[in-house]
Image (cartoon, helix red, strand yellow):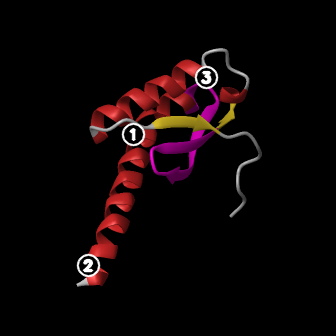
Amino acid sequence: MLQNAEAAPEKQMADKEELIRSVIDEIRPNLRRDGGDCELIEVCGNKVMVRLTGACVFCKLSSATLEGIQARVVERLGEFVRIVPVAGAPARN
């Protein structure tokens, strides 16, 4: 019974992360058209860490992009999250 109780929060977190990824995927074509992109780094509670890349790094409208992502995620999740931009080079696979 304890395993089921522990698995439930993990499933909720996985579902939350999947929803956030889908929101980023929805806006990705617009970002790429302008030479940029957005990468999900980590979800930690209500903090969602993302990395803007390409043209988005120096774009004056990057804060508006992040606000738009945040608004769409909040709308889909039905709970408040904070999108936090993370600096640095993208991870290598």
Q: Which residue is mark 1?
A: 23
Residue 4: mark: 2
The quadrant holding residue 56 is top right
Which x, y percent locates residue 84?
Answer: 58, 36
Q: Is residue 28 left or right of residue 84?
A: left
The amino acid type found where label 2 is placed reads Asn
Q: Quadrant of residue 4?
A: bottom left
Residue under numbered circle 3: 62
Please give left or right for residue 38 compared with residue 93 in the image: left
Q: Earlier in the sequence, mark 3 or mark 1?
A: 1
In the rendering, at what x and y percent does residue 26 appear? 40, 37
Q: Quadrant of residue 62?
A: top right
Q: Residue furthest left?
A: 1
Residue drawn 37% across and 67% down? 10
- The stretch of residues the image draws in magenta is 32-51
Residue in front for this viewpoint, 89 or 35: 89
CA distance separating discs 1 and 2 = 29 Å
Q: Residue furthest top?
A: 60
